[in-house]
Image (spheres, grey):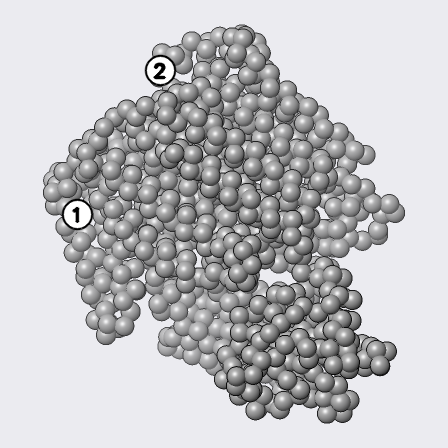
Amino acid sequence: MAPEIGHFALVMALMLALLGASVPHIGIHLGNRRLMALADRVAVGLFLMVAISFGCLMYSFVTSDFSVLLVAANSHTAKPMLYKISGVWGNHEGSLMLWILILTVFAAAVSLAGRKLPLHFRARVLSVQCLLAVGFLLFILLTSNPFLRLNPAPAEGNGLNPLLQDPGLAFHPPMLYLGYVGLSVSFSFAVAALIDGEVTPLWARWVRPWTLMAWIFLTGGIALGSWWSYYELGWGGWWFWDPVENASFMPWLAAAALLHSAIVVEKRDALKSWTILLAIVAFSFSLLGTFLVRSGVLTSVHAFAVDPARGIFILIFLAIAIGSSLTLYAWRAPKLVPGGLFGMVSRESALVLNNILLSCFAAVVLVGTLYPLVMEAFNAGQISVGAPFFNYGATVLMSPLIVALGIGPLLAWKRGRLSRAAQIMLPALGVALVAALAVLWHSSGQLIMTAVGLALAAWLIASVFLEVAERTQLFKKPGRFWARAKAIPRASWGMSLAHAGLAVIVLGITISTAWTKEELKLVSPGDTVKVGAYDFRFNGVAPVAGPNYTAVRAFFDVTKNGKKIAKLAPEDRVYAHPMMETTEAAIRPLLTGDLYAVIGQAAGGGKWSVRLYFKPFISGLWTGALMMMLGGLLSLSDRRRRIGAPTGSKAKKPSTKLKEA
Amino acid sequence: MQRFLPLIVVAALAALFLSMLLRDRNPHEIKSVMMGKESPAFTLPALLEADKQVTDDVLRTGHPVLVNFFASWCVPCRAEHANLMKLAKEHHIPIIGINYKDDPAKARAYLAELGDPYVTIAADLHGRTGIDWGVTGVPETFIVDGNGKIRDRLWGPVVVDSIEKKILPEIEAIK
């Protein structure tokens, strides 16, 4: 029964979305407030319908109802409950359901949290959001119905890909989708502003919290995915420039650029047209990611089952959504008159530089991801673009970004003084030089890129510290530090924390790349392998039986100078449904780095192949990402009072009226 | 003009994606597509004899042949090599080698070390011929009748099982 209810609710949702996508525009045209206010009710109703539908699908998974094709194909009774639930979005149809659920959550959130937006503007935003929902609901109902029945029902399901049976990956897609789809709000805001033909500082103030929220989720989603590949794929890599990773990275870069350019719109009424374009582009990157994963155009470990009909459908949807919004942009952009002027050396210029570099990076990633396709399309052969290309682009573009990032926050709006900023930043320059020279001297001039990386990270951390010190006058009047620190807005603390997070990530990448110790050995029980300063003693293996797998577990004692540090127990698992082998690396994070052990094949004669690593400061990657997220949250908590709480005269009138509606 | 730029980029990308979608490029469908079809033409430099060329004429001698894609960098190729030697020496089946995306010097060293089961070897330096044949990776082996028609395709290394159940019976059937 549940699947039929779910299917029905989905059809109802489509009807509501069609209503919400059309009626509010008519209401705005006629000046009819009741019709405009319909958008709010539709948004909430749409969310309820989709939630019911999603709930029904989840119910089928949890109760292992194998008469539903999707459940039979992707679940199994012996699976732990967590993975029965995460199995809902571990496949094409279910992940689309998650996508549309989040889309409607955001629509309802805009409606409920944005009560103080002018009614006509909120109605516009919601109707754009509804239009997006129409596209995705049609996609699900026409090409990817998750509620198809299977008759006769099999006694047992096929199971979920064992690689996906992992806590990190259970939460990675929802997190990432919250980010992807969160950008739809920025998109809807941009399209609504284009339809109205005006972008005000107020608009930037409304759109920033939503963008920030999406960016926080994206950061978390990408970090989780990277963490997962680090410990699950079994060789300690954490980023592969895989097309789908790139697809999640491009919206992140665009969202980061948007966050910064919206500040300029909010404070200085400049960069309007560019900011609108970024909002459209950021969500377009999200849509592109969905297309690449589902169409089979690019091959990747993340790809879902290939179906050309789906590819065509989503391409048409993509073309309509992105094409029409960009046409609207081309038509309206000349109307967006730039406001504030600013000098070459100013906070605005620094943010423009930030935007140029982030956008260039996104463009580099886009080119690298699609280049193999272009080559193939022109029959120039199949090629792949590898990590060196992307790493080169990242180094060339991110280095000046980090240098500018240190100085930017010290420049004044409109016209800053470089000499003042340079004076304050002099110690940071010293710290960076010392770090670089120390590395060069230590490695006798070998590790040039490491020296550059460390210098950049040191520069950034020092400059964040100096900026905070300057703001609180820590060195001039240390006694009043706390009083001043409290007076600094949270958004500013959030900025400092997020920037410091970037420095920690750069530190983690640089140090772990340069000084990782790796040993691949055949060992017998009792053997000791030296990895850097650590001794790994292999104590043999034991069989283990899990709920839906069997495994060989190896035991290592790790010592340093004879002192016990850790016990490690990596596993080599064989899952039964479907048959598949996975490695479970054993990782012990220490203050200085991670101990990392993987057990491989039995090599005969009681010997086992093992891979052992010491990865110094690799946890900096995830610590840094966490700092960025916390910084974002801090900033968000500051402006929570400001979400949809504008202070314009235009905005005040509708808010009171709305309560009657 | 500037404001139309994003639109133009998107239109170009959409056209690119569409052309890729409309092509039949699912590697798993190539099996049914290639089987029974004329083998794709090629003209490639010979690996062992300098200044000589190998063309698809070698597939039209009237005798059934095997076409084997291999590379020195490919571990499963090394694994199947003994079986290819057996096919050539004991069963006297001609095997055409296509050296896929390989360094010719390394390929020659590889053959010097393990023996040469091939009647002739073409060097497919850029993998172009591999794409024409729909090769998804090395090793892959095709059974071609004496008139250039592809009869069957074997993914991965040639194992004893596939020699007995596929290669020998099919070649016998062609004869």
- Chain holding disc 1: A
Q: Quadrant of residue B149?
A: bottom right
The reply to whether residue A619 is in sight is no
Label at residue A550: none
Rendered position, A610 above or below A323: below
What residue is disc 1 on? Answer: A425
Rendered position, A623 above or below A487: below
Rendered position, A143 above or below A164: above
In the image: residue A570, left or right of residue B39: left
Q: Residue drawn at (42%, 76%), measured in percent from left and top?
A: A531
> Where residue A94 sits: x, y (%)?
67, 43
Rendered-image quadrant of the N terminus of chain B: top left
What residue is disc 2 on? Answer: A648
> Where residue A62 sits: x, y (%)?
72, 44
> Where residue B42 sits: x, y (%)?
62, 72
Q: Quadrant of residue B80?
A: bottom right
> Where residue A156 sits: x, y (%)?
80, 53
The reply to whether residue B52 is in sight is yes
Question: How many angstroms separate mark 1 from mark 2 (CA)?
Answer: 38 Å
Q: Residues within 10 Å of mark 2 (few under 14, many from 20)?
A: few
Rendered-image quadrant of the C terminus of chain B: bottom right
